[in-house]
Amino acid sequence: MSIKISGNTPGGKFKFSGNGAGKSMKISTTGGGGGGGGAFDPLSIGDAICWFKADSGIYQSLSATGAVASVDGDRTGYWSDQSGQGNHAIASANDHRPALKVVGSKKGVHFEAGFVGPNGGGEPYYAGFLISNALNGRTQGGALTIIMAANAQTTYWNGNAYDSSLNASAISYPDTSQFRMGFDYNPGNPGHATIRLVSGGDGDPSQRRTIASGTDYVQSVVQSAASSYWDGTADNFVNGVQAEHIVGSSPPNYGARFDQFLATGNGYPFAIGSDGNSGYLGVIYEVLVYNKALSAGERASVEGYLNTKYGI
């Protein structure tokens, strides 16, 4: 009996057909994740323009030289883009570089939301990372997907509660009224964070997802193409479940305000962890940005990759 194998999708499952003496047995793939050894490759779905992961290509200095950040507490200054587009991120303040956080096999970047201590010392105050306003691979006005694995925290290093006047911006414009993905802290519900998307407008509050402080989660934002400043739609997903749907509207009630977000030459850098107005409180493990609206299947594949990697 001969065996014939057709199809070689990495990570795919195989279907067997035909057996018996004198017959061939055909093995064909039924699809599955990309990447070697069965692991899904986030680049396999195409159009990735940023990929930051704390376990690869993160340096202590403000350039890709010198020591790599590898142990808990190492300051981080330069985060290499793994997408191949060259959109590297640099800490916005050398003297307040965020620290690497290592918990078991997981590595992330720890942000402290710009906390200033009771004596004005502000230690530790961790700046965010900024990417150049001219992003390689970005189509102005085109669709966009951002997916992030993170851990939300509602208390500072010294045990003080998060200031409810701030919004924890994980990914943002410098002006958080235009775009922010992260969480809000409600002092009426201590120890919990409400994962949100703000895009110059708000979605239905009843759809928002609240998680316990110190919880790992995956947040995904899928934005449609936008032909004008207030055009388009945006969907926020938390751990694979839709949490908000924002629809563009005319001024002054802005909805999906995305038409120039991440567009080349738009004058706004892309901020991770802190944008100067509000900062993230917690750990960001990994960020992926695609220059398209991922399909439900594509988004689920990337989310599944992050879930598996970080045990979410």
Image (cartoon, rainbow, N blue to C red):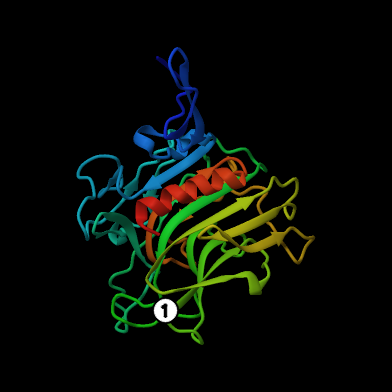
Please name whichever residue, 117 or 179, is drawn nearer the observer in this view of the structure: 179
Residue at image coords 46%, 54%: 148
Percent position of residue 29, x then y:
49, 29
Percent position of residue 53, x then y:
36, 48
Please name whichever residue, 167 or 96, is drawn nearer the observer in this view of the structure: 167
For badge 1, the amino acid type reads: Tyr
* Residue count near mark 1 (Cα–Cα under 10 Å), binned few <14, some 14–19, many ≥20: many
Looking at the image, is 207 positioned above or below residue 303? below
Question: Mark 1 — residue?
Answer: 162
Looking at the image, is 166 positioned above or below residue 272? below
SS label for mark 1: loop
Residue at image coords 54%, 55%: 220
Taking the view exactly as shown, the residue that stands out farthest to the front is 21
Q: Inspect this view and state whether residue 265 appears.
A: yes
Q: Viewed as shown, does residue 124 lie left or right of 171? A: left
Quarter of the image that includes the C terminus: bottom left
Q: Inspect this view and state whether residue 286 appears.
A: no
Please name whichever residue, 82 or 220, is drawn nearer the observer in this view of the structure: 220
Looking at the image, is 222 positioned above or below residue 123? above
Residue at image coords 51%, 38%: 48
Residue at image coords 61%, 51%: 222
Percent position of residue 118, x then y:
32, 84
Percent position of residue 91, x then y:
36, 53
Taking the view exactly as shown, the residue that stands out farthest to the bottom is 188
**In which quarter of the view is residue 272 placed?**
bottom left
Q: Viewed as shown, does residue 254 lie left or right of 135? A: right
Quarter of the image that includes the N terminus: top left
Please name whichever residue, 268 or 162, is drawn nearer the observer in this view of the structure: 162
Number of marks in the rendered image: 1
